[in-house]
Amino acid sequence: MDRVPPDRDDRAGNPGAGAAPALRPLTARSVVLSTLLGHHPPALPARALVRVAELFGTAEGAVRTALTRMVAAGDLEQRDGAYRLTDRLLARQARQDDSRAPRTRPWDGGWEIAVVTPDRRPAAERAALRQAMAALRLAELREGCWLRPANLVRARPAVVTEQCALLTGAAPEGDPARLAATLWDLEAWAVRARALEAALRRERAEGLARRFTVSAAVLRHLLADPVLPASLLPADWPGDRLRRHYEDFDREFRELLLRHIGG
């Protein structure tokens, strides 16, 4: 349940559907984050987080050190005997939950277009905008111009409205499906999605640690799904199928994990 955005390690190798996907090892910090991001409400006592980390052979001292550092960094707060996500990570949890069941609307052919208006921006503002655009599932057509099909329902954060002119209109001339394929690496996403779908089937018979790691990988991957209209997607797109299989997997996995935490 690690809700960390996908990185190069997650995409490396592009394994086929029959191959076991490369899975990123989980540190004490990522185990804590994954556990809390997958828990509603996102608050647990230290002893429960230690119990989860034990699945990976992580010592209690390492977990408590990670908790102290995460509180100091503003990732967590300690209150009422529990560690809780702060507002910044609550926003990440909301994005993760949305990636499991994206809110869409019928597509009429229009595109969201965001054009950066300031001539000069500090590096921190540019980085914040890029992060916000990724969360909104917009892609950069060229420097300062972002777009996507207008089929998603979600709010735009202030960092976007302050730096961009926002429009809805027609896409550049040409085949919209071809444009989508240039904005997103749909083939690579689909290949890894099929490999993770196969892993979900295999890992249901494995131990909790392996299930936890696979669950984290699936959720990272779903965050990278552009959630395009069906008419712009390649045939046999695995997005919705991966979501359905994950929900089934997650119900059983979460019951086992809560049993372990309470044991």
Image (cartoon, rainbow, N blue to C red):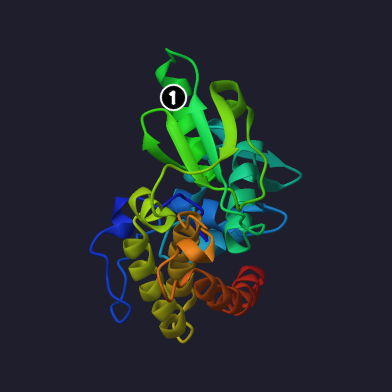
Q: Is residue 17 above or below residue 5?
A: below
Residue furthest toward the left? 13
Mark 1 surroundings within 10 Å by alpha-carbon count, few (fewer than 14), some (14 through 19), many (20 or more)? some
User: 242 left or right of 14?
Assistant: right
Looking at the picture, how far across and down is residue 176, in whole percent? Answer: 43, 54
Looking at the picture, how far across and down is residue 118, in whole percent? Answer: 48, 15
User: 15 left or right of 97?
Assistant: left
Examine the image and state in which quarter residue 206 appears. Answer: bottom left
Residue furthest toward the bottom? 205
Q: Nearer the viewer, residue 231 or 201?
A: 231
Q: Is residue 119 above or below residue 253?
A: above
Q: Secondary structure at mark 1?
A: helix
Looking at the picture, how far across and down is residue 88, in whole percent? Answer: 61, 37
Residue furthest toward the top? 120
Q: Is residue 244 above or below residue 48?
A: below
Q: Residue at x 62, y 51 (%)?
A: 152
Residue 47: in sight, yes or no?
A: no
Residue that numbered label 1 is attached to:
126
Residue 106: in sight, yes or no?
A: yes
Q: Nearer the viewer, residue 131 or 261?
A: 131
Q: Nearer the viewer, residue 78 or 3?
A: 3
Q: Residue at x 57, y 58 (%)?
A: 99
Looking at the picture, how far across and down is residue 222, in whole percent? Answer: 49, 60
Q: Residue at x 49, y 75 (%)?
A: 208
Q: Quadrant of the C terminus?
A: bottom right
Q: How many marks?
A: 1
User: 24 left or right of 213?
Assistant: left
Q: Is residue 76 above or below residue 160?
A: below
Q: Amino acid at mark 1?
A: Arg
Residue furthest toward the right? 80
